[in-house]
Image (spheres, rainbow, N blue to C red):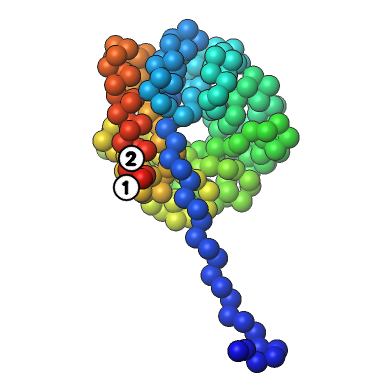
Amino acid sequence: MSQPGAMSAARPAPPRAPHPPVVQVSLDLTSVDEALHVAEIAVRAGVDWLEAGTPLILAEGLRGVRALHERFPGHPVVADLKTMDGGYLEAEMMAGAGASMVVVMSQAHPATVRAVVRAARQFGLKVMGDVLAAADKPGAARALQADGCDYVIVHTGFDERHERVGATPWDDLAAVVAAVDIPVQAVGGLRLEDLDRLPAAGAPLVVVGAPLVIDHDAFRAASEDEALEMVLRDVVRRVKGAARS
């Protein structure tokens, strides 16, 4: 029994609860019709989240996000805006179109990150902060978390991978996971066989996208419908199965 006035030893903080694995399909396409077609296949295959990729947003704007939300209201839509400025307005507009999540870049001014977060809190969004091109990715991830982001994306960019052959999120993933307490996503330069390893590595938000499902250069579906559905079903099975094992 402790003596009166004795200070009790500080207890360590409990470990963070693991985030359940999520499979997200990146719809890096340039037409609403094609995006809806691939999304239909992805939903049948068991994918959880639908990403309105940057090419789709550039080509179709709010119409692409709204169409995905209206056709698949039970599936959260990620609007990959890659916001660098005007954060509040962009997030507000995407919320109005039915997005559940928006993406802001760590390379944006911290005021922009905080503006996106303010809008997200007001309009019921979640914020994904992307550390693409950050010189210090763990530091950038910590800053995103401090400014209120809900998720961090460890992203090796399309152009970067063409100049720095062999670069992948594995280069930075462990350091970023160790730096933050919020769920992490890894994207860019991964292979299909990498995906079921990600939850155990601390990145439970798994993306299937270009060039795995979407054609590497043309931004179109990379295979016929049945083959595409088989690939997606296999990814969902392996990612969810790996988390249970």
Residue 205 as seen in the image, left or right of residue 126: left
Q: Residue furthest bottom?
A: 3
* Circle 1: element type: loop
Which quadrant would residue 196 be assigned to in this image? top left
Task: Please name whichever residue, 22 or 165, is drawn nearer the observer in this view of the structure.
Answer: 22
Q: Is residue 189 visible?
A: no
Left or right placement of residue 141 versus residue 46 in this view: right
Residue topped by disc 2: 241
Q: Left or right of 121: which side holds 168?
A: left
Amino acid beneath label 1 = Ser
Q: Whole-Å distance between the Cαs marked 2 and 1?
A: 6 Å
Residue 68 is marked as: none
Residue 221 in the image: x percent, y percent?
35, 14
Image coords of residue 111 (percent x, y): 67, 41
Residue at the extreme top of the image, as rendered: 33
Kind of residue at disc 2: Gly
Q: Which residue: 35% across, 37% down?
A: 239
240 up-or-down from 93: above or below: below
Q: Residue at position x 69%, y 27% from top?
A: 92
Report x, y in % for residue 30.
Answer: 46, 12
Residue beneath label 1, please?
245
CA neighbours of label 1 inside 10 A, class few (<14), some (14 to 19), many (20+): few
Quadrant location of residue 233? top left
SS at badge 2: helix
- In this view, the residue farthest toward the right is 122
Q: Residue 194, can we see it? A: yes
> Where residue 99 sits: x, y (%)?
60, 25
Badges 2 and 1: C-beta atoms under 8 Å apart? yes
Task: State which quarter of the image contains the N terminus.
Answer: bottom right
| Residue at 48% over, 24% down | 50
Q: From what the image shows, is residue 95 above or below residue 19?
A: above
